[in-house]
Image (cartoon, rainbow, N blue to C red):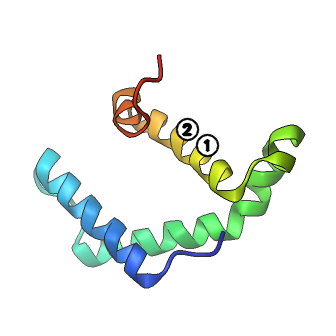
């Protein structure tokens, strides 16, 4: 998958700003720092997708779409944040 568009990166930035302002008080970074972090994360994902794909089991790697591989990555990452947060995204996981 290609890097996100500038508009999509802005959407992520706005969403994170809203999420953190609703759930936590004060962040030790600026809005510009968060935008740079979103950009860096997107670039890192693009730069490292070959290594991620290589790490997947062959059957999944060879048969899953790029969107499915990305959703798998996101689900694992969200579970690292919080299983409850993953439930909000995927629904019932138990």
Label 1 residue SS: helix
Residue mark closest to the camera, 2 vs 1: 1
Q: Position of residue 36 (x, y in %)?
A: 39, 76
Q: Residue at x 34, y 28 (%)?
A: 84
Q: Is residue 60 visible?
A: yes
Q: Residue at x 22, y 63 (%)?
A: 17
Q: Position of residue 70 (x, y in %)?
A: 61, 53
**Residue situated in front as seen by the camera: 33 or 46:** 46
Q: Which residue is mark 2?
A: 76
Q: Is residue 91 above or below residue 21?
A: above
Q: Is residue 79 above or below residue 29?
A: above
Outermost top residue? 94
Q: Residue at x 42, y 24 (%)?
A: 92
Q: Is residue 76 left or right of residue 69?
A: left
Label 2 residue SS: helix
Q: Which residue is mark 1?
A: 72
Q: Residue at x 53, y 69 (%)?
A: 42
Q: Is residue 57 visible?
A: no
- Whether residues under marks 2 and 1 lie with C-beta atoms below 8 angstroms apart, the answer is yes
Q: Is residue 68 left or right of residue 33?
A: right
């Amino acid at each position: 998958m290609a890097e996100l568009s500038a508009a999509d990166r802005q959407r992520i930035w706005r969403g994170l700003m809203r999420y953190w302002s609703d759930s936590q008080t004060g962040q030790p970074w600026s809005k510009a720092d968060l935008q740079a972090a979103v950009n860096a994360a997107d670039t890192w994902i693009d730069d490292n997708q070959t290594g991620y794909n290589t790490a997947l089991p062959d059957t999944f790697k060879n048969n899953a779409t790029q969107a499915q591989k990305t959703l798998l990555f996101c689900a694992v990452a969200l579970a690292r944040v919080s299983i409850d947060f993953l439930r909000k995204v995927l629904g019932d996981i138990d």
